[in-house]
Image: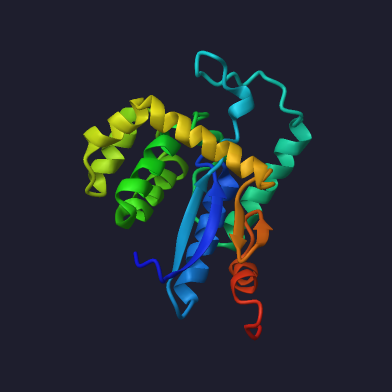
Amino acid sequence: MSEDVDRITMYSDYVCPFCYLGRQSLDEYRSARGEPLAIDWRPFDLRSNKRGPDGKIDHSVDDGKDEAYYERARENVERLQEEYDVEMRNLDEVPEVDSLNAQLASTAVQSDYPEQWEAFDEAIFTALWLDGRDIGDPEVLADLAREVGLDPTEIRAAIEDDAHREQVHSQFSAAQQRGVTGVPTFVYDDHAARGAVPPEHLRRLVEPDAAPQ
């Protein structure tokens, strides 16, 4: 995509249901917008504090979020799903997976094949939130790459590349240093909106001087 195209930055993690909903909201806004708006995606690692030295997620680690928090989150997901008319699986049917491999794969595609990144990004979200697939599995990611016309061998290689892994961890750290504490976070022209905000909110972020619709 041309460098001249307007861009919105989106920090997200594939395992976050609000990121999936926020992406749907962003796509709705982009569809209604007169001019193209590209996504400058930045990965964010929600489960870094639960990932042990062996690289596995320990879901028993206390993250300060109790059952009441998760119940409110569930209610909000269901509300936004209905409000945005978004199809997605019941949260109980979505597997608990580690998104690190998906983010490694996605950042590699974004860097090497930017024109195909958006299709790959959508494929990852769809695989988890509609199909209930394990997006932490390199073979699932390789299949998704093949489906959007990418070389699955390159995806497997990117996941295994230690240097690339370090670069992605640096991106996680950079997001925190910029003050991103939760996702999705949308940034445009030094202004930010956090959460799965509606399309009109994104429109005000990007077009602050536009007349209300």
Please tell me which residue is depicted at 56% across the width and 38% down the height of the picture: 172
Identify the residue at horizontal 64%, vertical 25% (top origin).
Answer: 49
Near-viewer residue (51 or 200) = 51
Which residue shows up at 41% across the image and 71% down it?
4
- The quadrant holding residue 91 is top right
Specify the color scheme. rainbow
Residue lying at the far bottom of the rendered structure: 211
* Residue farthest along the top direction in this orientation: 54
Classify the position of the C terminus by image quarter. bottom right
Q: Is residue 99 visible?
A: yes
Of 55 and 74, which appears nearest the observer? 55
Q: In which quarter of the image is the N terminus?
A: bottom left
Q: Which residue is drawn at 45% across and 38% down?
A: 103
Task: Residue 51: give x, y in percent of width and height.
Answer: 57, 22
Q: In this view of the protein, can residue 134 be seen by the observer?
A: no
Residue 149 percent across, percent down from the top left: 22, 48
Q: Is residue 170 above or below residue 195?
A: above
Q: Residue 46 in the image: x percent, y percent?
A: 60, 35
Position of 47 compared to 56: left or right? right
Compared with residue 25, is residue 31 higher up or lower down, i.e. above or below?
below
User: Which picture quadrant has residue 48?
Assistant: top right
State left or right for residue 99 relative to residue 22.
left
- Where residue 134 sits, quadrant-wise, is top left
In the image, residue 99 above or below residue 87: above
Query: How many marks do you count on the picture?
Result: 0
Q: Position of residue 15 (x, y in %)?
A: 53, 38
